[in-house]
Image (tube, grey):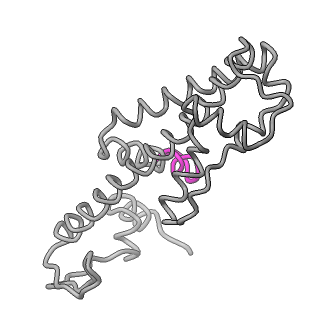
């Protein structure tokens, strides 16, 4: 495309989008969209659409916070039980060598260990009726979990999970949403550059 210097100056002053008519405004008296209930609704302004969207999205973040708290609580409980088992095994409170599985499960139940908290939480989400107590998360502990380094690593993981749970518990759903929006904005800036 060729332009004279006068045309180039005019395009610069006017803005290239306006000068070349690359964008235009759409005037609409009404907009018909599906609302949060899946019903067609007439919206008069964009702000009305955003207000409707905000209510739906906020309710989803309330549910998301509850879901995260349930998941983190189950994971923290699992780590707590594993750490407690290791500590009780090291100090001799629990002896499981040469016992049958049924006896070992009885000891764990008697001492107040929970069946796998993560599996139990997942079953409540899926509404699965399998109520068989599952202690395999304790059987799967490895020998190196009983040495000082393994024990300390498990205790640190447990403490980190409890802190993560506390952090989520102390946040409002609106804060979670704002953090997600900030994360999205940062990703978009990385993808498209730092243009506003």
Residue at 26% across / 83% down in the picture?
33
Residue at 71% across / 11% down in the picture?
91
Residues 115 and 71: in front is 115
Is residue 147 magenta-colored?
A: no
Residue at 60% across / 51% down in the picture?
119
Range shown magenta = 185-194
Q: Is residue 42 left or right of residue 146?
A: left
Residue at 77% across / 21% down in the picture?
150
Task: Using the rendered view, name the quadrant where residue 48 is placed.
Answer: bottom left
Residue 122: horizontal and vertical position, in percent? 55, 56
Number of disc labels: 0
Q: Is residue 105 above or below residue 3?
A: above
Magenta stretch: dominant SS? Answer: helix
Residues 1 and 140: in front is 140
Q: Is residue 60 left or right of residue 188?
A: left
Task: Using the rendered view, name the quadrant where residue 95 is placed.
Answer: top right
Task: Using the rendered view, name the quadrant where residue 106 is placed.
Answer: top right
Q: Is residue 142 above or below residue 16?
A: above
Residue 135: horizontal and vertical position, in percent? 67, 43
Is residue 188 magenta-colored?
A: yes
Residue 98: horizontal and vertical position, in percent? 86, 31
Q: Is residue 69 left or right of residue 158?
A: left
Residues 34 and 136: in front is 136
Q: Is residue 134 above or below residue 42?
A: above
Quick one: quadrant of the N terminus? bottom right
Q: Is residue 70 left or right of residue 43?
A: right
Residues 126 and 161: in front is 126
Residue 143: horizontal and vertical position, in percent? 85, 26
């Amino acid at each position: 495309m060729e332009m004279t210097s006068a045309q180039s100056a005019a395009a610069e002053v006017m803005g290239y989008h306006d000068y070349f008519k690359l964008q235009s405004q759409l005037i609409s008296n009404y907009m018909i969209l599906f609302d949060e209930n899946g019903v067609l609704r007439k919206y008069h302004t964009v702000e009305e659409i955003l207000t409707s969207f905000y209510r739906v999205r906020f309710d989803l973040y309330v549910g998301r916070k509850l879901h995260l708290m349930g998941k983190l609580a189950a994971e923290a409980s699992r780590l707590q039980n594993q750490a407690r088992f290791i500590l009780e095994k090291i100090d001799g409170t629990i002896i499981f060598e040469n016992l049958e599985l049924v006896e070992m499960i009885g000891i764990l139940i008697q001492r107040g260990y929970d069946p796998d908290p993560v599996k139990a939480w997942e079953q409540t989400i899926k509404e699965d009726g399998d109520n068989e107590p599952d202690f395999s998360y304790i059987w799967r502990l490895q020998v190196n979990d009983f040495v000082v380094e393994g024990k300390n690593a498990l205790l640190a993981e447990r403490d980190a999970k409890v802190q993560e749970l506390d952090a989520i518990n102390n946040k409002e759903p609106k804060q979670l949403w704002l953090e997600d929006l900030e994360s999205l904005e940062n990703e978009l800036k990385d993808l498209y550059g730092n243009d506003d």
